[in-house]
Image (tube, rainbow, N blue to C red):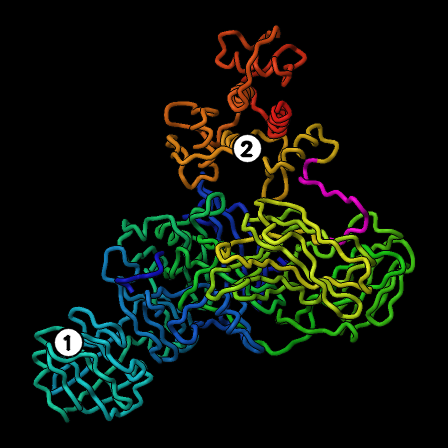
Amino acid sequence: MARKLITIIVVLFMLTLTVSPINGQAAGLGNKVSEVKTEVSPQVIHSQQNYTSGSIRQFVNVLDVNLNNTYTKLEIGMPNPINSLKTTSAMAKQNTFDGHRVVGAVNASYFLGNGMPANLLAENNEIVNYGILGDTYDSPTQKPVAFGLSKSGKAIADYYSTNLTFQVNGKSYPIDLINSERGTNKNVLYTPDKRSTGTNTWGVELVVSGASQDTSTLHFGDQFSGTVSHVTAYGAEGNSTVPADGFVISVQNKELAAELSSITAGTSVDVSLSIDQKWMDAQFILAAGPMLVRNGKVDISMPTNSGFASTRSPRTAVAIDATGTNVSLVTIDGRISGHSNGVNLSDLAAHLISVGATSAINLDGGGSTAMVVRNPGGYFANLVNRPSEGSERRVSAILQVVNTAPPGKVKSITLSSVGQVMKGSSVDMQVVSAYDQYLNPMTINPANMNWSVEGNIGKMDGATFTATQKGEGKIIGEYEGIRTSTAVKVVDLAEKPIVLDSFDNTSSWTTEVAKANASLASSKEYARQGAASLQLNYDFTTAGTGTKAAYMVAKTPIAISGQPKNIGLWVFGDAGKHWLRGVVIDGTGAKHTIDFTSQGGLDWSGWKYVTANIPSDLPQPLKFERMYVAQPTASLQKKGQLYFDQLQAVYKDNHEELVYTDVTKGHWAFSEIQSLYDQSLIKGYSNGTFKPEASITRAEAATIIARALNLTTTKDSSFKDVSKSHYAYSAIAAVEQAGIIKGQEAGKFNPNGQLSRAEMSAILTRAYKLTGTSKVSFSDVKSTHWAYSHIQALVANDLTGGFPDNTFRPDAQITRAQFASFLNRCLSLK
């Protein structure tokens, strides 16, 4: 939702579920088509789920938390100062330390334009922020609803009622706000933290000193008094200084102001602050809204036909089961085509009920929706959903799940990947990660482990493996009864590249920045090879001048076997014109910068293979330490995402990487597809495939033709079925203006329609101004066929000869490989 609210103001291993989470069949979101569960902390389960309902997709992250677990806590996380705003991942990281590890969190509070939380936040009765309620039809906090933990530790999601009053001269008056801007007909209590009230003259203020308690911190249950030292005059005075030992009561209503203006110095003022009993002494209270589920039924505390409630949006919610001990933190992505559409509040409430919720409230959503989760044994929680704006938004408070367990016994050890090693070379073994019985990270010195080799391929000297014999085997490490191993292949010469990191697991990488913000994630969607790629989210829009950079740093530098020619890497670019570099460490410990691109050379979108040459005179052994993206040009300092896969050492000259994982050199159209790729005219998919036998769509054809002819346009497309947000909108508008591709019917382009061979003929003849006729007569293309002249032009220019049975098959769908072949032939006519 909009950030400036003016009026209102989560698979490393699979385990059998050991909690009683809120799960089951899913009403409201459609059919569950996939789910992956991981225990990330004792009795804390992270689930990633995909649902479909017709054309609607939903990507859901759930953290199921069993509050009965001794070492599992649920808390509010807040920035310091309270109005500074930080991302969910940043707050989770800052709140993580030994004995208090944030294993997961979601964004929680709404916030105001000044960065303050919009609604009530309290801890152990302390009123951290009193906040306001929404007063418009579209406000999600029209009713006072909150989530929290009772004094006994049971979760609550319900309405709350506060009673804040001040008494003077025997009469009692309400207090509407604490330390907030004084609005129409509002009575505000200002404390020393505010310093001055900041009010205008149109009100009366009772300046009270000598308070019977420290008023810099207020609590539900407080009752205190003080003595009036000054009363401002209506229309003449405002912006009172708040006494360090007192408070100010500020009244705007003219009639009430007149009544209180007669109060004189020395008069006693009593203040009482209370909340209804079910919330009294709560461990914490976090107000948001609206209420979604109450007593196991849909109970939405705002009009469901309002825009806020009825629109499909990203959402964040917290739900509780009937016992009050099982809590689910839920995020649903939205506004991302092909990934997740988002959900309205009615469907969200129905879904939560279907998975066992008896009470639930909505938290801040929209662009703020974020969930961070650590992997088992991870140090910090990382983003697991996809924010609708492409990166995390800064927020005012989070709900965080905390592991408070003491150090435990080792449970799992993961060794560095060795892969392929050349005979005669050595590798220092490293522990990539290790965690204890409570799934918390451990540090294990490889020198303290017992090492052995299986397969008669080498020997160990301490933690150093030396390859002595060609063959395959394992390096085995043991520590406190836990045995682990990694496969190794010893070769005489590295005929193939040696993979340094597949990025299937990103836990061994961290970020550093220079005048920038950055975070890392594991991406399955953009996995070109293997299970995942390394996703870098960078933000160069931060304050400050000069070169900005985001570094991806190996927690333990990666050993490089022998002397490679270069280091290769697949990169999914975003056309940001950045500089991609790396750092290797030689045998003396000296660091050397290597270039994967020139300055500004990371200028492509989609997957591309890049290499960085390694000087041949560097002392061995070598290690790869980091890669980074730098941007010295101020106008190009933006934000975005990059994806990295298959970091490898290459030992042979003229090594070639397949451009697409599904188009081998034996494919009939390999050279044509390769040629168009080299000219940046065609691109594959995010998983590194080309899908040569898939039918090409009209939108894809338009995009390729527009690139091939370098077409642009300043005019809008006339097709009503192609929105401006469509990836091919500009290309479709350009080919329409050039008269190359026309609609299939009035006002409709049918971008997802599959291109026929006849349509392809028309497109290519128009695009390349092909003319001519031939003596070839296809049995299925009569002279009256709408594409007859176009097909004849292709034949006349030796671009096609049809099929052996003397047919052209004009209505048959053309594949992506076939289109590439035809287009490549057209280009050769130039």
Is residue 656 part of the magenta span, yes or no?
yes
| Left or right of 330 in this view: 514 | right
| Residue name at image x 51 percent, y 73 percent | 94
SS for dot 1: loop
Quadrant of the image occupied by residue 47: bottom right
**C-beta proximity under 8 Å, tags 2 and 1:** no
Measured from the top left, where is residue 564 in percent x and y?
A: 80, 55
Is residue 429 part of the magenta span, yes or no?
no
| Residue name at image x 56 percent, y 76 percent | 97
SS for dot 2: helix
| Left or right of 9 in this view: 429 | right
Dominant secondary structure (helix, strand or loop) of the stretch shown in magenta: loop
- Whether residue 756 is visible to the viewer of this picture, yes or no, is no
Q: Amino acid at mark 1?
A: Thr
Q: Badge 1 is on which residue?
A: 201
- The crowd level at tag 2 (other Cα within 10 Å; few <14, some 14-19, many 20+) is many
Q: Quadrant of the N terminus?
A: bottom left
**Vertical position of residue 240 compared to residue 789: above or below:** below
Q: Amino acid at mark 2?
A: Ile
Measured from the top left, where is residue 575 in percent x and y?
A: 55, 48
Measured from the top left, where is residue 759 in percent x and y?
A: 52, 21
**Vertical position of residue 23 compared to residue 97: above or below:** above
**Vertical position of residue 669 compared to residue 146: above or below:** above
Quadrant of the image occupied by residue 761: top right
Of label 2 and label 1, which has the lower sequence position? 1
| Residue name at image x 74 percent, y 54 percent | 613
Measured from the top left, where is residue 341 in percent x and y?
A: 43, 46
- Stretch in magenta: 648-663
Label for residue 704? 2
| Residue name at image x 36 percent, y 75 percent | 122
- The crowd level at tag 1 (other Cα within 10 Å; few <14, some 14-19, many 20+) is some
Quadrant of the image occupied by residue 632: bottom right
